[in-house]
Image: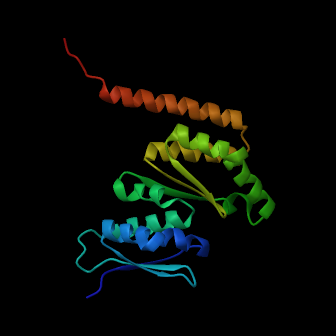
Amino acid sequence: MEGSKAYIKIPGDRIGALVGPDGTVKNVIERKLSVSLEVDSENGTVQITLPATAEDPTVLFRAKEVVTAIGRGFAPDHAFRLLDDDEIVFEVIDLRETVGRSVSDLKRLKGRVIGKEGKTRRIIEELSEANISVYGHTISIIGYPDQASIAREAVSMLIGGSLHGTVYRYLHKKRRELKKQRLQLWEPTYRS
């Protein structure tokens, strides 16, 4: 008896990243999630098969996320964060919902998020600790829920036309809040 299947279509130019040199990336996904990936490089379709003996059906969902993340432009090592921790989330923002089909508006918004020589994207990643990918008509985010939320808000602000300085100030403020929360988690509570 065969298990559950899922199908995903990824861009042709991302097939190589999904398979990896000598199949290494595909093998890591298959090994870590106990799934089978069949990649059709002609049309970009990826079939994910969960064996009938699988105990956790959510593995199929996680495999779809990892494949989609690589398809949306993430380097495999960033997409593998989804394999290593169940808390990590993956989000995709479709810019077409904001600008419709206008190629020039799409380019402009992507440019705002990337910034000159990638500066803005790098700052968002450093201060939110999330990974960002700008690919095609999407901006994707991988991180813990609080990290992803900060990155998503920064991207939304940029898409909405906020000044880069305003977004950087927001990110610095959120970064301080995250650090403060982490310190409070580790502070011993003394009782007198």
Q: Nearer the viewer, residue 32 or 173?
A: 32
Relative to 183, 147 lies left or right: right
Q: Residue furthest left?
A: 192
Q: Residue furthest bottom?
A: 1
> Looking at the image, which residue is at 55% across and 79% down?
44
Asked if 185 appears above or below 99 in the picture, the reply is: above
Q: Quadrant of the C terminus?
A: top left
Taking the spot 48% from the left edge, 29% from the top edge, the residue there is 177
Question: Toward the viewer: 20 or 139?
Answer: 20
Q: Could you tell me which quadrant the N terminus lies in?
A: bottom left
165 sits left or right of 26 in the view: right
Query: Is residue 58 something that shows in the picture?
Result: no
Write the residue at 51% across / 57% down: 91
Judge whether 23 appears above or below 172 on screen.
below
Residue 124 placement, left or right of 96:
left
Looking at the picture, how far across and down is residue 26, in whole percent? 42, 71
Is residue 35 or residue 146 the one in the foreground? Answer: 35
Q: How is the image coloured?
A: rainbow
Q: Quadrant of residue 124?
A: top right
Residue farthest along the front direction in this orientation: 22
What residue sits 31% from the left and 28% below the top?
186
In the displayed structure image, the side of residue 164 where residue 191 appears, left or right: left
The image shows residue 2 at horizontal and vertical percentages of 29, 86
- Residue 65: percent from the left, percent from the top? 45, 64
Q: Look at the image and tell me whether residue 21 can be seen.
A: yes
Kindly give the residue lying farthest to the top in the view shown.
192
